[in-house]
Amino acid sequence: MSNPLSDMDKPDVFFCIGTNMTECHPVAATRIKQALQRGAKMIVADPRKIPLAGIAHLYLPLRVGSDVALLLGMAHVIARDGLADNEFIAERTKGADEFLEHLKPFTPEWAAEITGLNPADIEKAARMYGAADRGAIYYTLGITEHICGVDNVQSLCNLALMTGNLGREGTGINPMRGQNNIQGAGDSGAVPANYPGFQPVNDPANQEKFSKLYGREIDSEKGITKVTALNECGKSIHAMIINGENTLVSDPDRAHCQHSLESLDHLVLIDIFRTETAELADVVLPATAFGETDGVCVNTERRVQRLRQAVPPQGEARPDWWIVSQIAQRLGIPGFEYESAKDVFNEVCGLSPIYTGLDWDRIENAEYQWPVPEKDHPGTPILHEGEFKNGRGLFSLVKYRDPAEVVDEDYPVWLTTGRRLQAYHTRTQTGRSAGIDYLLSEESLEVHPSDVVKLQLTDGGFANLTSRRGTVKIRVRASDQSPPGTVFCSFSFNDVPVNILTGSGYDPITETAELKVCAVRVEPAED
Amino acid sequence: MNATAEAQTHTLILDDTEVSFHEGETIYEVAQRAGREVPTLCYDKRLEAFGACRLCVVQLEGARNPVASCTTPAEAGMVVHTSTEAIKKHRRTLLELVASENPEATINPLRGFASQELNELLCKNDVQPGRFQGQQSGTSNGDDNPFILRDYDHCISCYRCVRVCAEQEGDYAITMMNRGFETQITTEFNNRLKDSACTFCGQCVQTCPTGALGDRKAMRAESLPGELEKTRSVCPYCGVGCQVDLLSKEDRLVGIQPAMDGPANEGALCIKGQFAFDFVQHEDRLTKPLVRGDDGELHEVDWNIALDRAAEGFRKVLKKHGRHAVYGVASGRAPNEAAYTMQKFIRAGFGTNQIDNCSRA
């Protein structure tokens, strides 16, 4: 997030797109609800009539995968109606002339054609966000899990740049991170293109720094992504170590994923449960869990917080860092003589510019949001204040593309997937917590009542859901939360492995799968 | 910048001492800041002041009757007494009235964050129940949900639960029905919480000052031996990063309470953070390393054998297929130290950048 969570009481206008916040980030959503009670306005764009849509001042039920068209249409209106912040554009951005020229053909009528929205609503959204003194954008995986995920994010950046809604309180571009420490994993360098602290691996200075620190020459080329690595299993990749991920259930195209992991010579898994993925591993190592582990995690607003141990580990479970270090030591890799999580974290602070001002003791009270470039630095709650890291904000000349799969005669229904309030990911944790089943005991397919009739389904009965990659049997639940022509379910239940169906395409830059769109057919099935 | 300090332009006299305050502060807030102990029952600093319990009354010179300090704005030149004999007597009488309406009971602190507030006040003010013997209010509710006990015999109608649900959560799942002595907290159509707009975030439980609402999951541990301990940590689910206090008794994790001063959540939690913690000590947890045997099955082994086997597999692949053939996937669920050592394992061990995390799916 460019702005802190506490900023959520400051915007005049929220623009929430592709974020089912009340179910996926419920505590952040309470801040929005409070802001609305105080008079803020909200635009919600989402194919499904999610709870946030019910309290929005303007709800835009766009077709799945048509976000770029909506955002181009809004940008067109903002430019056309003189709502752009010309001062901000002149002082802080680059490429505005080309961008404004680029926008000309993308009228609200053009966008309406693609998104299925009413052109007047697109104009209204543009005027609400464009005229706001403080406009804040919030998004989640509904934006990124598309073949055009990067285009979607850049389109949102364009809107914020052209209206000057960046680098100030109550504004910004705010992705809500879905996992407790996904931010920290990236911060710590567990990405193929960056060393810890987002230091690019292809910068010779960084390569030299880390080669020296780690005592060996490290490639200057970035590594491959996990998505590519799974494609390469048995070809160029022959061994994997996976920490705390139930890859088989959470990743797209389950059959492909299973085949990939089975093609490895050696698979080591570090986890807290014997997951579906563990069944494919050669070695499974038990890690300590939440409540048993001392450590550090970083939230969606870049706040660096301490995790503390309250109870002893179950059985012989050991901390992840200890397990990895033990394997490293057995392979003769130097620099793994850590005695505590504190040792490890302090090493990271010493080599990562975003954590330079931090150490284990300084984060005791969770006061700091990175970057914290020096010891006396107060941290950086708001990014891009005064100037952008790279100088000027660059407009992107984004164009609309169809999803990897579009509906046709054989697969006439859009399937979009997501999460539910009471379940987390593949339910390895929520599914093992007493009481959750009282509220959510099985997965169901959300189908609009008119489609239930049209597709000859029965509310409460079963349907076969078929994509080009497979079939899944699932209970049908009539609900007008999904629009006609689009069905929804979560990927949380292993007995309804919906990721058998997904995996139609990937964003060419991030290689994030298009989990939010897939063409299916829905047919009645026997109980 | 210190906006508070700049705005503190007014002063008033609080218990013979001049104190400064800023526009918009109530007498209660000024007294709190000055370290005065003013008792409350209906007050939760996250909510609009309500003025229902009247325990926070203070003597205001020039006013005929004591005023509720939580709803009275501070004004320049006010002369306030927070703890005169008359005020103390007044508060004790109020507490006696409250106490006589409810059954005498020890409330286990496992019921909720604020559950001890009433009993602590009774104790501190040496209040003996029974002075106003009579009918008792409230009736317990047969709601069978596994999360929230609704034991309205202990309800004092402070409406903190109703207000936190509306003001903080924006859910409006609960409300009150009837008037006066018959007042009852209820849901729409007086049904189970499951049939209401309730999301089971547990906020009503944590703000209840009497334990009328209780955390049923934590209460399972009432009879467990050992001291109740609290350990500050961070919720393991989404990226919001809500701070929590882990409740433990000896080696058991028995419950979760929200950290009222957690910077991301300021006391709020959702159903997952509040109630979905049993996985930690679930019988399905991996407790020993496993390696795949010649029979194709996973077998429990000791750490040395498992770690040797893990290392040996990488050594073999390195020799046969080269250093780029080894790939690491770090977790977005484990701490920074896990991700850092994973990337170091790949970079320092194999000299490649064949490392990623689970953010792409």
Image (cartoon, coloured by chain):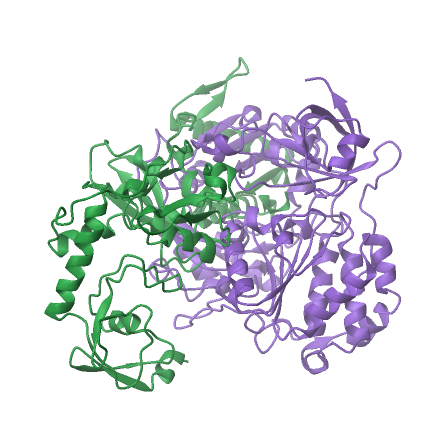
Image position of A311 (left or right of A151) = left
Image coordinates of residue B334 in percent, x first then y, are: 47, 44
Looking at the image, residue B279 sits to the left or right of residue A269; the answer is left
Q: Where is residue B143 in the image (x, y as percent from the top left)?
A: 41, 34
Tell which residue pokes out farthest to the top in this image: B295
Q: Can residue A411 be seen in this view?
A: yes
Q: Name the one closer to the observer, A272 or A222.
A: A272
Measured as percent of width and height from the top left, residue A34 is found at 51, 61
The residue depicted at 73 percent of the width and 36 percent of the height is A449
Q: Nearer the viewer, residue A333 or A140?
A: A140
Is B33 located above or below residue B5 in the figure? above
The purple-coloured chain is labelled: A
Q: Nearer the viewer, residue B265 or A248?
A: B265
- Rendered location of residue B190, percent (x, y): 45, 40
Rendered image quadrant of residue A77: bottom right
Vertical placement of B16 versus B124: above or below? below
Reply above or below: A8 against A253.
Answer: below
The residue at 52%/44% (across/down) is B197
Q: Quadrant of the N terminus of chain A?
A: bottom right
Q: Which tint is chain B?
A: green
Position of A428 compared to A131: left or right?
left
- Determine the image quadrant of residue A152: bottom right
Question: Does B134 sit left or right of A503 as displayed?
Answer: left
Residue at x-position 82% and y-position 56%: A400
> Where is the C terminus of chain A found, in terms of image quarters?
top right
Q: How many labels were placed on the picture?
A: 0
The answer to whether residue A307 shows anywhere in this view is: no
